[in-house]
Image: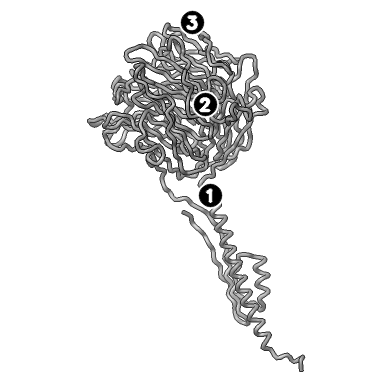
Amino acid sequence: MFELGIVIIILGTQIHHHKNITRKIAENPYLLANHNENMNVYLIIVLLSYLSFIPLAVPSSFDDVTSETLGASAKGLIAAFGDYNANKNTDLFVIGDAGTSVKIYLATKEVTSDESKYQEVVLIPGNTANGTVITSVVPADFDGDNQMDILVTRQLKDVTGVRVQIYWGHRQQTKLEAMPLEIQGGLKDQPLVLDANGDMIPDLLGESLDGKRQFYIFQNGQRNYTTQLLNDTADPLRNPQSSAFLDLNGDLTADLCIVSEKDKKPQLEYWYNKDGVLTFEKSIPYPTDAELFGQISFLDIGANRAEGNHVYGILPACTDTKCTKSVLYVLTDSQDQWSKLDLNIKTDKMDWNFVPPDQNPGGMDKIPITVRVGDYNLDGYPDLLAVLRNTSQEGFQQKAFILENRACSKCVSKRHFGLGYEVPMHSDKEKALLPAFYDFQDNGILDLIVTTYGEDNSPHIHLLKHTFTDDAFFLKVKVVSGLCSTNCLNGREPYGINQPGPVVKYTTEDNEGRLQIGIASQLTQSAHFSLQLPFTIFGLGQTPNFVDTLEVSIPYPTGKAARKKSWTAVIPNSQLIIIPYPNDDPSSWINKLFITPSRLVLLTGAALLGTCGFLAGIVGILHWREKIEDKKEKLIDSHKFHFDAM
């Protein structure tokens, strides 16, 4: 694991007294002496010219740890992530029992532990009597009591629209209140969870069955809602819905991107936050040279790392309805035109493409094409995770792949995505359905979790631990509601809240002194298994420098100033929990920092201990030789004839 360089210089000299050795050693601790009286003594000066740990080129790997963590029989659809019991660990929400129940896998480990065990708890028991199927789960705090509530959408077979229910959190933290709140009249599709009025209480954006696009506003301390019409002449929302709540123009304030349809053709609507009010800015039609579109995702692709503030819309699509050719479209915040992003998803023998929704197994034909974002190799360039199928062979193998974000000098955006890691299946007949990035060890390294359909035509969950070997660094930031700090109800910690709307930006320098900037918004989407983590992980690459500046902002209401704060000299490999309490006083916001030592730090510590041990051994040997020489001299002195005594 390391290379030890030692330069040994052998010098010949003559020493007449052993005390000279002690003096020379005091002057140079790397001096080894072998001394015999009245003889030529050879001094061995050991110079540690360098002691460097050079990691071996061991590639990163993913290992299936499902049995050790979730249990061998983990089944269900991955639905959401969140710290339900506020212990700083990320729990897993799962839809089970053929879509009739919701259960949670509570992480019971400590943050610094390598062992991860989960406790399975049923939050919503299965009930087939009402004839509905649960289609989504969104954890959030809708009443401001700092206890996670659960929003679920239910769908009746062959019935248009969805029922939206909110189950209120219980103080026991392993159960929910029995009677949920239901959105009256239902919605046409799954809603977007956002903070529409800047009070740090999540709200909803949806379209009622009678065609009204409106906000459903929740208030602190109330378990009810009011409606606010967004625009009574607006175009209908697109189904499936993929609207997002994020910073679109780089001002560190969350804006709104609505996906709607005009003349039955999809489009984006940009609503900028102006003085606390979401105001319509422009609409951008979807590309015209594709037949099938997936869910739009947003990321800082890293094409202009030194400029920052560039959020790109990434739209997966197919040129035909059977997805025989897949494309990725990219839209920057400063342009209104789509361009094709180079997508290399072919191998020598196989041709891979996105999976049309009607080709998904197990009747999951409503799950749209989705690419999920995460920097799995921490190089500072976010990667994508997608489900692809092999269309060049019979049987249509369907697997999950990491699409690596790579440099491309000839590409328009200077970046492109190519096949990276292939998530292993237990058999060729097993088909991937819902893959997601998941930091299950809470160490800043992104692992993988996948729902697959096996030969038994039922969903299985596989958790793959990422063994990361590169000396890359990260910054992990989670922003909570800040409605309380040390005064939370029932003595609950202020950590376990999924909060949409915060924007995080960092600025630092790489090893060559070039400016490096990254920006991201927290929990931007919620519909149709967006599977976003309730925090942001920035890859810093191999840059062990302090992060110069970390800026955090939260939504603000009308009539208030923008709410943001910055911190300087942030330690890399840090996990930060930002508690913006009080919301209107950024100078009082709390930053709780947890350090995760990197492999380089551990190796450096081992090098230091090894060096100290080596020097201690030398000193011990010299001390032992000194005592031997002293004994010899005393023995010689005792046998000398003393003439003075005569």
Q: Earlier in the sequence, mark 3 or mark 2?
A: 3
Amino acid type indicated by mark 3: Asp
Side (left or right) of 411 relative to 587? left
Q: What element carries label 3?
A: loop
Task: From the image, tell me which residue sits under label 1.
Answer: 602
Tag 2: amino acid: Asn
Left or right placement of residue 360 versus residue 2 in this view: left
- The residue that disc 3 covers is 232
Q: What residue type is labelled 1?
A: Leu
Whether residue 310 is visible: no
Which label lies toward us, 3 or 2? Answer: 2
State the residue in front, 199 or 57: 199
Q: Distance of mark 3 from mark 2, alpha carbons?
A: 30 Å
> Can you tell which quarter of the image residue 319 is in?
top left
The tag on residue 519 is: none
- The residue tagged with tag 1: helix, strand or loop? helix
Q: Residue at x 50, y 7 (%)?
A: 231
Discs 2/1, front: 2
Front residue of 110/463: it is 110
**Spatial CA span between label 2 and label 1:** 33 Å
Q: Is residue 420 above or below residue 132?
A: below
Q: Is residue 280 left or right of residue 262?
A: right
Q: Is 513 in front, or is 594? A: 594
Picture disc at residue 498? 2
Res. 307 image quadrant: top right
Q: Can you give x and y, in whole percent of width and height, for residue 155 in the image?
A: 37, 16
- Mark nearer the N terminus (2 vs 1): 2
Q: Is residue 424 something that shows in the picture? A: yes
